[in-house]
Image: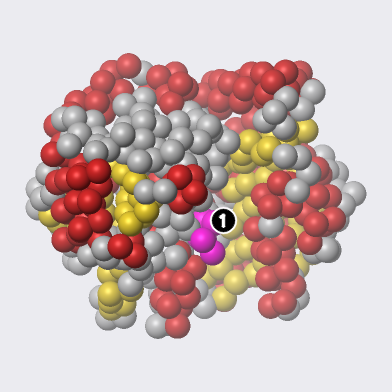
C-alpha cells in the first residue's frame, strides 16, 4: 500500500489525465496475455517524456516501490504482472517516431510506438524493418526490445536484438543512460545495448530506441507445401537448411491447426494434409529462382505437394492464415497455453515426435504451429483453467516439452521470454552459476530489486 502523500507525488509528475489509482482502473493492468494469475498494482502512471520517467524512477527508489514497465501487455510469459503491487509505468504515450534516416538507414523511436505502425512508416520511406512478431498490430517497440521478440522472418533476418543499435534508458536512481548509437561500428564502453535486449524491464526503463533498417527485397516467391506426414514436413525443413537455403520464412502448421484456421477464417487451406509448410524465398530475382529450385527438389524428395501463390492476394491470404493461427485456436477452449520451445533446426523431426508422445501421454488437445525454419515451434495446449485436474496434466505436459527441448540442445524460450511462466525451468537450461551471475548484475544496478521483480528467477 502506497501512502496518499506519495501517490500525490506520482500525480504531480504526470498530471491528472495520466494517473490512475482506483480498483476498476488498476484491474486492467493486473494481467497480460499469459495464463499467470493476475495481481493488482497500487498505481498506474503514463509518462510522456524521459524526464518524467526519470522522476518516477527516483520516486520509486526513494520509497521502495516496485516499478513494472508495460507497453500493450501482449507478452505471453507473465513478464508484466505486478506480483507485489507497486507502480505500473505505462509507456503508450511515448509513441513518436522521432527520425527515419534513409541515408544511414536507421530510425529513432520512442518505446510506445506500435510495431506495425513503425514497419509501415519505414516501408513508406523506401526501407525495410524485418522483425514481425505475431502481435505486431498491438505490441510496442519497447516491449519487442525488452522481450527480444521474434517473428516469421527470424530464420533469414534475425530477431529484434539484431536490429537494436542503441537505447536511451533511465536507471533506478533516475540517471539517464545512453547505450550504443547511430554508427554501424561502436566499441565505446560495455555493450549496454545488448544488456537491455531481453532484460524484461529488470535493468532500466527505455525511453528511446535506435533501430537498424535494411534495403527492401527486390523479388519473392511464396508457396504452400502440404504433406501427408508431419515428420516429412520436419525433414523438409532440415533438408532445405542443409541445402544452404535460408528462406525469408518457413512456417509449419499441423493438421489440428490447419483445420481450426480454415474453419475460423475461411482461408483456403488443405484440411486433409497432416501438415503444411508456408515457405517464401526472397532477394534478387535470379537468386529467388535458384533457391526455389532447391526448395522444390527437397520438397519433392519428402513427398511435399507445392502450390505457389500466383498473385499478391493469394500470398497475403497465406500469411494472414498463418497469423490467425493463435486467435483461431483460442476460440476452441476457455484457456490457451502457448509455448515457444525451440530446438536446433535439424532436430525438428525429433521434437515433433516428442510432442506427439506428450499429447497422447497426457490426453490433451495440442495444436502445433510456428517458425520451423529457425526451430521455434509453438505447441499450443487448449484447456480450461478452472479444471484443476486438467491443469495438472497441462503443467506436466509443459514440463515434458521443455525437458524434451533441452535434451535436443534447445531452449525453453525462442522469442517470448521467461517472465513468471518459465522461471522454474531456467536452472535446467542455464545452471545456478548463470542465474547467480544475472543476480549480481541486477544487484549492481538495482540494489533494492525494484525494477520488475519476481521475473526470470530474480
Q: Is residue 148 magenta?
A: no
Q: What secondary structure is the magenta-colored segment mainly? A: loop
Q: Position of residue 60 (x, y in %)?
A: 20, 42
Name the residue beneath numbered marker 1: 134
Query: Does residue 407 appear to the left or right of 328 in the view shown?
Result: left
Q: Nearer the viewer, residue 427 or 309?
A: 427
Total numbered labels placed on residues in the image: 1
Residue 428 appears in the rendering? yes
Front position in the image: 66 or 297: 66
Percent across and percent down for residue 448 are 19, 30
Name the secondary structure under disc 1. Answer: loop
Viewer-proximal residue among 52 and 255: 52
Whether residue 137 is in magenta: the answer is yes
Q: State left or right for residue 373 relative to residue 147.
A: right
Q: Residue furthest right?
A: 272
Q: Can I make out residue 417 in this image? A: no
Residue at coordinates 54% horizontally, 64% vertically from top-left?
A: 137
Mark 1, residues whose alpha carbon is within 10 Å: few (<14), some, or many (≥20)? some
- Magenta highlight range: 132-138
In the image shown, does 278 or 36 lie closer to the viewer? 36
343 relative to 99, above or below: above
Q: Quadrant of the N terminus?
A: top left
* Image quadrant where one finds the C terminus: top left
| Residue at 20% over, 58% down | 12
Q: Is residue 12 above or below residue 340?
A: below
Q: Residue at x 16, y 30 (%)?
A: 447
322 left or right of 13 in image: right
* Residue 330 x %, y %: 71, 46
- Direction from residue 364 to residue 98 in the image, left or right: left
Q: Which residue: 33% across, 73% down?
A: 97
Q: Position of residue 173 (x, y in %)?
A: 12, 44
User: Is 98 rendered above or below residue 53?
Assistant: below
Amino acid at each position: 500500500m502506497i501512502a496518499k502523500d506519495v501517490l500525490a507525488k506520482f500525480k504531480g509528475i504526470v498530471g491528472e489525465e495520466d494517473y490512475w489509482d482506483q480498483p476498476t482502473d488498476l484491474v486492467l493492468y493486473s494481467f497480460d496475455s499469459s495464463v499467470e494469475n493476475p495481481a493488482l498494482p497500487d498505481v498506474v502512471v503514463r509518462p510522456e517524456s524521459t524526464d518524467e520517467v526519470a522522476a518516477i524512477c527516483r520516486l520509486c527508489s526513494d520509497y521502495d516501490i516496485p516499478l513494472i514497465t508495460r507497453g500493450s501487455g501482449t507478452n505471453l510469459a507473465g513478464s508484466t504482472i505486478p506480483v507485489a503491487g507497486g507502480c505500473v509505468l505505462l509507456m503508450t504515450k511515448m509513441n513518436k517516431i522521432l527520425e527515419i534516416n534513409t541515408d544511414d538507414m536507421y530510425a529513432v523511436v520512442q518505446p510506445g510506438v506500435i510495431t506495425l505502425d513503425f514497419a509501415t512508416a519505414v516501408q513508406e520511406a523506401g526501407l525495410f524493418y524485418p522483425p514481425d512478431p505475431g502481435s505486431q498490430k498491438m505490441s510496442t517497440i519497447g516491449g519487442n526490445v525488452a522481450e527480444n521478440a521474434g517473428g516469421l522472418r527470424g530464420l533469414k533476418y534475425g530477431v529484434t536484438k539484431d536490429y537494436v543499435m542503441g537505447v536511451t534508458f533511465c536507471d533506478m536512481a533516475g540517471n539517464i543512460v545512453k547505450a550504443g548509437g547511430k554508427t554501424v561500428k561502436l566499441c565505446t564502453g560495455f555493450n549496454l545495448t545488448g544488456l537491455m535486449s531481453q532484460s524484461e524491464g529488470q535493468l532500466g526503463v527505455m525511453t528511446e530506441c535506435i533501430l537498424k533498417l535494411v534495403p527492401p527485397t527486390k523479388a519473392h516467391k511464396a508457396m504452400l507445401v502440404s504433406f501427408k506426414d508431419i515428420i516429412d514436413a520436419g525433414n523438409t525443413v532440415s533438408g532445405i537448411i542443409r541445402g544452404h537455403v535460408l528462406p525469408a520464412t518457413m512456417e509449419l502448421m499441423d493438421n489440428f491447426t490447419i483445420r481450426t484456421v480454415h474453419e475460423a477464417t475461411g482461408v483456403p487451406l488443405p484440411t486433409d494434409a497432416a501438415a503444411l509448410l508456408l515457405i517464401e524465398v526472397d532477394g534478387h530475382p535470379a537468386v529467388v529462382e535458384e533457391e526455389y529450385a532447391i526448395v522444390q527438389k527437397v520438397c519433392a524428395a519428402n513427398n511435399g505437394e507445392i502450390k505457389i501463390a500466383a498473385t499478391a492476394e493469394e500470398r497475403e491470404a497465406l500469411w494472414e492464415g498463418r497469423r490467425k493461427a493463435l486467435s483461431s485456436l483460442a476460440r476452441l477452449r476457455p484457456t490457451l497455453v502457448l509455448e515457444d520451445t525451440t530446438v536446433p533446426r535439424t532436430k525438428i523431426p525429433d521434437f515433433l515426435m516428442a510432442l506427439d508422445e506428450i499429447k497422447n501421454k497426457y490426453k490433451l488437445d495440442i495444436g502445433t504451429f510456428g517458425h520451423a525454419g529457425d526451430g521455434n515451434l509453438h505447441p499450443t495446449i487448449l484447456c480450461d483453467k478452472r479444471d484443476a485436474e486438467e491443469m495438472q496434466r497441462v503443467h506436466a505436459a509443459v514440463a515434458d516439452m521443455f525437458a524434451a527441448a533441452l535434451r535436443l540442445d534447445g531452449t525453453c524460450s525462442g522469442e517470448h521470454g521467461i517472465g513468471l511462466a518459465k522461471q522454474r525451468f531456467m536452472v535446467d537450461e542455464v545452471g545456478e552459476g548463470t542465474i547467480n551471475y544475472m543476480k549480481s548484475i541486477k544487484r549492481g544496478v538495482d540494489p533494492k530489486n525494484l525494477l520488475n521483480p519476481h521475473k526470470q528467477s530474480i
